[in-house]
């Protein structure tokens, strides 16, 4: 087992990485390997099983990605050769993207398989032949059950975020998938913790693995500032909004899905553009939220623990525990979204009065000083490398919070004087309709006078303007028959249904009598 510091002055070429791949990494600004990469890449390239334990954000994807891309073989249709198992959709998409970058220009074909999207595209990719499949266990099991995938040729396996798999209850499915792979496979397992159920995976599916356990050193631990603030429930949103505005791009963690949606809406009302991401949102919504956060279009990403592990977002200045986690491991993984890869960051936990005791117990288990402080925004300062993104986010806030229109107002929508209210849409439509109608005669204002029916404007020839289906199909309006006077438009339905003595008439009987008279005349 390796736990000593690795000389990071090495370059990737010193680890056995081919010059074209090392050059591609250098063009992306990746020139020196992180400790977990320097420790595991040579052993994995030599064909050994590797078990890596390293903090979140330490570069594990490149650590297993380079050996996987270099050693995997060419796949047949529906039978991939390399397999990466991950717990969440976002992590699957991220890992697949990183492997595709490493595989350029003529390397193995990489495809991601996860739920929330349709099957046809994924089935077609498997039929063409996928060399490396990055998959969530549930979706991969569905594809196998439908006969679209076969794992018997898989001879290189990576299990990423294994402890998260255990927490989410995926280990039984992971075991069933691993049992279907080739017996002489190479297996790499990476996780932030290697205890409990994860140790069962190591003992059952790895052969004499080389363990590399790396920890935060004092310098790494000092890059993140941890603040525990005592707040009342009514001021939590205001404090969170102020922290986001001062610090820059921030991930806000909530306990429930509804809470995440509510907090995102409340941050918007405070002038902070925010997007929610959790399990009830569609895959497209989750991807759009992450893209908006990556681009700086939103300043706050409000998430449940679905985003706590394995999601790498560059330049996250701050993490806010809006609802403090109950488990120390959840606190570590949430907080690991900031202060990554040598950057600095801020972690703020908002503690309600009824949560003070459990939070102090959490501090004790984490090794933090026990106690709560009052809110002190002066401790929140923008991280220099995030100023540009904060500026973009602030421009977005100003553009969406102002009421001043950027274009000339449409006719009829000019600002009204103070104290005046604009008529509702229904009132405007009614006024417009009344303006286009004409009455046959002046309205009778006597009390009890019957209301007059509206009539449409007449054409110059005296005929009515076609309406309804006649207007749509270009037919002429019906004309009264010769010798029969046209019915008067000034009489109402109510008056036409009354007898001569003013009492309501029997309309059915009157109709039968009229029919009899017409037949007699005929």
Image: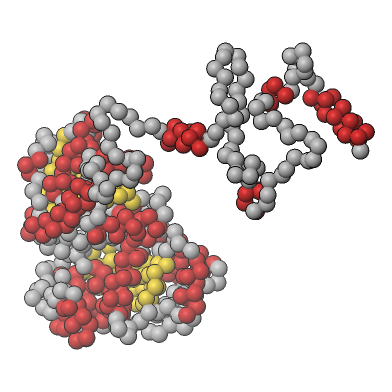
Taking the image as shown, residue 379 lies to the left or right of residue 365, namely: left
Q: What residue sits 47% from the left and 75% below the top?
A: 126
Quadrant that contains the N terminus: bottom left
Depth check: give the residue in front, 319 or 40. Answer: 319
Percent across and percent down for residue 222 are 8, 54
Q: What residue sits 62% from the left and 51% below the top?
A: 472
484 up-or-down from 131: above or below: above
Residue 186 seen from this side = yes
Residue 197 seen from this side = no
Q: What residue sits 27% from the left and 78% below the top?
A: 102
Quadrant that contains the C terminus: top right
- Find residue 351 and report its image quarter: top left
Q: What residue sits 42% from the left and 78% below the top?
A: 130
Tally of numbered discs = 0
Depth check: give the residue in front, 248 or 495. Answer: 495
- Find residue 203 and report its image quarter: bottom left
Percent across and percent down for residue 518 are 88, 34
Report the colour scheme.
secondary structure
Percent across and percent down for residue 189 are 31, 68
Depth check: give the residue in front, 86 or 193. Answer: 86
Taking the image as shown, residue 455 lies to the left or right of residue 84, namely: right
Percent across and percent down for residue 158 are 34, 71
């Amino acid at each position: 087992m390796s736990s000593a510091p690795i000389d990071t002055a090495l370059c990737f070429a010193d680890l056995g990485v081919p010059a074209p791949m090392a050059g591609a990494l250098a063009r992306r600004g990746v020139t020196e390997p992180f400790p977990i990469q320097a420790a595991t890449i040579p052993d994995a390239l030599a064909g050994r099983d590797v078990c890596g334990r390293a903090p979140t954000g330490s570069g594990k994807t490149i650590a297993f990605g380079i050996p996987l891309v270099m050693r995997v073989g060419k796949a047949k249709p529906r039978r991939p050769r390399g397999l990466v198992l991950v717990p969440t959709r976002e992590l699957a998409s991220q890992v697949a993207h990183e492997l595709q970058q490493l595989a350029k220009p003529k390397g193995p074909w990489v495809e991601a398989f996860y739920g929330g999207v349709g099957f046809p595209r994924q089935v077609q990719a498997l039929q063409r032949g996928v060399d490396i499949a990055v998959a969530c266990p549930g979706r991969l099991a569905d594809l196998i059950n439908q006969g679209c995938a076969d794992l018997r040729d898989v001879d290189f396996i990576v299990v990423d975020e294994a402890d998260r798999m255990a927490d989410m209850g995926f280990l039984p499915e992971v075991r069933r998938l691993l049992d279907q792979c080739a017996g002489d496979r190479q297996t790499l397992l990476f996780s932030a913790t290697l205890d409990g159920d994860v140790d069962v995976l190591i003992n059952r599916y790895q052969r004499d693995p080389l363990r590399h356990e790396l920890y935060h050193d004092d310098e790494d631990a000092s890059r993140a500032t941890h603040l525990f603030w005592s707040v009342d429930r009514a001021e939590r949103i205001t404090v969170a909004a102020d922290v986001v505005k001062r610090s820059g791009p921030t991930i806000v963690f909530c306990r429930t899905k509804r809470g995440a949606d509510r907090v995102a809406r409340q941050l918007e009302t405070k002038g902070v553009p925010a997007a929610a991401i959790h399990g009830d949102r569609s895959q497209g919504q989750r991807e759009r939220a992450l893209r908006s956060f990556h681009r700086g279009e939103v300043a706050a990403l409000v998430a449940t623990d679905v985003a706590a592990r394995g999601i790498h977002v560059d330049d996250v200045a701050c993490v806010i525990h809006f609802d403090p986690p109950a488990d120390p491991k959840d606190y570590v993984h949430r907080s690991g979204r900031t202060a990554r890869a040598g950057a600095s960051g801020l972690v703020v936990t908002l503690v309600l009065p009824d949560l003070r005791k459990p939070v102090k117990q959490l501090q004790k288990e984490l090794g933090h000083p026990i106690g709560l402080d009052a809110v002190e925004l002066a401790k929140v300062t923008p991280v220099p490398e995030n100023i540009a993104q904060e500026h973009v986010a602030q421009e977005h806030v100003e553009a969406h919070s102002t009421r001043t229109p950027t274009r000339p107002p449409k006719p009829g929508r000019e600002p009204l004087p103070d104290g005046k209210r604009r008529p509702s849409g229904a009132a405007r439509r009614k006024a417009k309709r009344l303006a286009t109608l004409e009455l046959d005669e002046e309205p009778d204002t006597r009390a009890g006078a019957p209301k007059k029916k509206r009539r449409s404007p007449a054409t110059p020839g005296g005929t009515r303007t076609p309406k309804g289906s006649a207007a749509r199909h270009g037919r002429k309006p019906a004309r009264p028959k010769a010798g029969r006077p046209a019915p008067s438009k000034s009489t109402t339905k109510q008056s036409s249904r009354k007898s001569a003595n003013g009492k309501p008439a029997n309309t059915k009987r009157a109709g039968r009598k009229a029919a009899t008279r017409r037949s007699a005349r005929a």
